Every structure is written in C-alpha cells, then in structure tokens.
Image (spheres, rainbow, N blue to C red):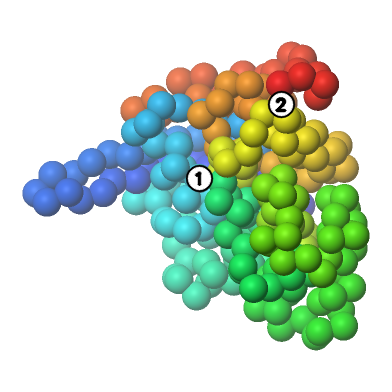
C-alpha cells in the first residue's frame, strides 16, 4: 500500500446495547498514526481506550465510521477476514503474557507462523531470529516457568513481532512487572521503535506513556488531547 498511515480512523463511533439503553463508548474518533510512530493511548476507566484498542486490533467493529489498517479498509470485514488481518498485520502484547505453559519459548514465538501455515524449519528459523532480536536467543528452549516475568514478556513481544506486523499493539505491557523490569521492557520498546516498528500502547501509567513519542488522551469516548512527547525519560530511571 502507498499510504504513509499505519492506522487511519475516521469518525469512529461505537455504541453498545445495555438492556433498553444504548451506551456510547466512542463518540467520533479521528486518529491517524503514521508508519514508524510510537503512540500511547491514555484515559481513566470508562474513557473508551479499551474499546478503541479493540477496534484498532480488529477485535471489534465500529458502529459507524471507517478504519483503514496499513492502507486496507477493514471496517466492514466479516469475522474470518478480520482474523486473517489480525494474523498478517497486527502483533499483540498483553499484560498477562498469555504464553502456553508447557511449550518452550521457541514454539510460543512460532505460534502465529504455525497458524499462518509456515513449515516447521522456516517457523523455527524465524522464531529464533525474533527471540534474538529481543535478547532471548539463549532461552529458546526454556518454558515460561523457567523464565522471569521480564523474560516472559520478551517472549510475548517476540511472538507479536514474528509475523513482521504493520502495527504492534501493547495493552498495559508493564502491568505485571516490577519497576526495574518495566524499565527494561520500555527500553526494548524504544529499540523496536528506533528500528522502525509502529507501536500503539494502552497504559494508565503516565511514566510508561511518556516513553512513547506521542500521547493521545481519551475522556468519555472522545479524544481530548493529542500531544507530542518533547523529551522521553531516561532509561536509567523510571
């Protein structure tokens, strides 16, 4: 695609039915994220940030409005088509890691490639290369129980990257980590951004958000601020 935009949301609304009531979770969202940007989305509970992340992640559809992901209109795709888009164009990092407990790091990272039909040899080659990218090549045969929390999150980040997604989506990626480990993970995100990755992160933590280069703030389903981060914090302190 020729569009410089990784994410292009125009006039997005999302309304949920709650009994006889309708709840407006998003009310006219316009958001454009260029390729290679690093954006944090913030807002209090009920602001709509999780709903927005679900729409960006093709886990939900908007009620009205349009969404182009990496130049492709995904607003009205059916469930099967959305699943294919998620596999090809999106990588997800969650607070809880979501690793398979009885499976080593290499196979955990290779799962998206398995679902994409990649053969075993190529799957292992790409999974190992991605583990090395996040600094865990020497832990490829370790299971999650044999890894620290920070290492588990690195495995989860590698799994999100292995398909070379157009957008890396991170939902509270340091929520289960201590301060020092959180600093390490945010340093890794900085390296990924410096390498050209497009990153969109949802967080409630102002310190975490300020490691991004742009902060979008939501309130009551609307964007109330969209600001550049002038000087991200040092990685020697959090």
Q: Nearer the viewer, residue 99 or 94?
A: 99
Residue at position x 18%, y 44% in the image: 22
Would you place residue 45 above or below residue 83 in this image? above
Residue at position x 84%, y 61% in the image: 139
N-term mark: 1 or 2: 1
Q: How many marks?
A: 2
Could you tell me which secondary element the residue under label 2 belongs to?
loop
Q: Nearer the viewer, mark 1 or mark 2?
A: 2
Residue at which label 1 appears:
53
Would you place residue 24 above or below residue 80 in this image? above
Q: Nearer the viewer, residue 83 or 237?
A: 237
Residue 17 position within the rendered picture, expressed as x and y whole percent measured from the top left: 20, 50
Q: Which mark is residue 226?
A: none
Residue 27 position within the rendered picture, expressed as x and y whole percent measured from the top left: 35, 35
Position of the C terminus by quadrant: top right
Could you tell me which secondary element the residue under label 1 belongs to?
helix
Residue at which label 2 appears:
211
Residue at position x 77%, y 19% in the image: 237
Would you place residue 229 above or below residue 40 in this image? above
Residue 220 position within the rendered picture, expressed as x and y whole percent measured from the top left: 34, 28
Other residues around mark 1 within 10 Å, as few (<14) / some (14–19) / many (≥20): some
C-alpha span from label 1 to label 2: 19 Å
In which quadrant of the rendered view does residue 73 lie? bottom right
Q: Nearer the viewer, residue 34 or 43?
A: 43
- Marks 1/2 in contact by CB < 8 Å: the verdict is no
Would residue 130 be seen by someone viewing this image from the given angle?
no
């Amino acid at each position: 695609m020729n569009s410089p935009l990784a994410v292009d949301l125009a006039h997005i609304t999302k309304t949920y039915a709650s009994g006889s009531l309708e709840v407006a979770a998003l009310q006219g969202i316009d958001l454009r994220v260029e390729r290679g940007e690093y954006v944090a989305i913030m807002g209090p509970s009920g602001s709509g940030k999780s709903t927005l992340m679900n729409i960006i992640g093709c886990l939900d559809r908007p009620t009205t409005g349009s969404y182009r992901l990496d130049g492709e209109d995904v607003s009205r795709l059916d469930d099967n088509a959305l699943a294919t888009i998620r596999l090809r164009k999106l990588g997800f990092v969650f607070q809880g890691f979501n690793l398979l407990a009885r499976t080593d790091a290499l196979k955990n990272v290779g799962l998206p490639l398995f679902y994409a039909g990649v053969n075993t040899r190529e799957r292992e080659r790409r999974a190992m290369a991605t583990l090395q990218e996040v600094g865990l090549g020497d832990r490829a045969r370790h299971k999650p129980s044999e890894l620290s929390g920070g290492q588990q999150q690195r495995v989860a980040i590698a799994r999100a990257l292995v398909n070379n997604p157009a957008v890396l989506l991170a939902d509270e990626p340091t929520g289960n980590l201590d301060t020092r480990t959180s600093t390490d993970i945010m340093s890794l995100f900085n390296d990924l951004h410096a390498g050209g990755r497009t990153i969109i992160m949802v967080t409630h933590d102002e310190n975490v958000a300020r490691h991004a280069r742009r902060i979008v703030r939501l309130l009551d389903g609307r964007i109330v601020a969209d600001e550049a981060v002038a000087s991200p914090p040092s990685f020697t302190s959090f």
